[in-house]
Image (cartoon, rainbow, N blue to C red):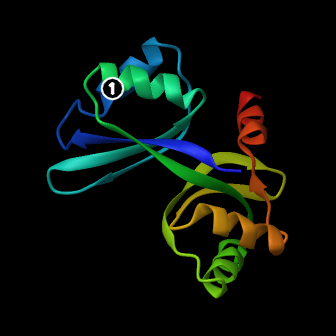
Amino acid sequence: MKLKQLSLFLENKPGALSRPMRILAAAGFNILTLSIGDAHQFGILRLILRDWAKAKKLLEKEGFVVKVTDMVAVEVADEPGGLAEILDVLEAAGVNVEFMYACTEKRESKALMVFRFDDPDNALRVLRRHGIHAAGSAGLLKQWQG
C-alpha cells in the first residue's frame, strides 16, 4: 500500500524549518517521519503524518507550496546486507529508487525504510512477488500510535 508524503520548499535560512513545524504542532499534527535535503537557496522538507490531506490544506492556507507524493514503506532486515537484498530485487526488476529515508521506528528485527519509486505500483508488485513486506498505511500508522 502506498503512503502519502508532503513535500514543502523552504528557504535555506534560519527559522524556515521551524515555521511549518510550529503550524503543524499548534494544529495537533504528529509527524511520523521526515527528511530534509538542501540545495543552495532552498530546502525540501518531506514528511509523512496522519491526515495528510488536512495538513496539506493547513500548510497551503499558511502560504506553503505543498506537493503530494506516493511513497512505499518497506520492512528491511536490521542486519548487514538487509537493505542491499531489497535493492538487488528492485534493481533486477528495473525499478528505480528516486530517494529514500529511514524511519526511527523499529519492529522486532526489522527497520522501516520509506522509498520513492519511479513506479510505486510496479515496485509493490515486485516486492510482494519476492516476499518483501511493504507496510500498509493502516498498519504503519497503528504501529506509530503505540
Residue farthest toward the bottom in the current orientation of the protein: 92
Q: Is residue 134 left or right of residue 92?
A: right
Query: Residue at the spot x=40%, y=20% of the render?
Result: 58
Q: Relative to 110, is 44 above or below? A: above
**Which element type, helix, strand or loop, lies under badge 1?**
helix
Residue 101 in view (yes/no): yes
Tag 1: Cα neighbours inside 10 Å, few (<14), some, or many (≥20)? some
Residue 9 appears in which quarter of the rendering? top left
Residue 65 appears in which quarter of the rendering? top left
Q: Position of residue 104 (x, y in %)?
A: 62, 46
Query: Residue at the spot x=32%, y=19% of the render?
Result: 61
Query: Residue at the spot x=50%, y=67% of the render?
Result: 118
Q: Is residue 114 left or right of residue 124?
A: left
Q: Choose between 104 and 38: the one closer to the eye.
A: 38
Q: Relative to 79, is 71 above or below? A: above
Q: Choose between 88 and 62: the one closer to the eye.
A: 62
Quarter of the picture containing the C terminus is top right
Q: Relative to 27, is 83 above or below? A: below
Residue 79 in view (yes/no): no
Q: Is residue 32 left or right of residue 18?
A: right
Q: Choose between 14 and 9: the one closer to the eye.
A: 9
Query: Residue at the spot x=66%, y=83% of the render?
Result: 93
Q: Position of residue 25 (x, y in %)?
A: 46, 18
Q: Position of residue 57 (x, y in %)?
A: 41, 23
**Mark 1, residue position:** 60
Q: Position of residue 63 (x, y in %)?
A: 25, 25
The three-letter code of the residue at mark 1 reads Glu
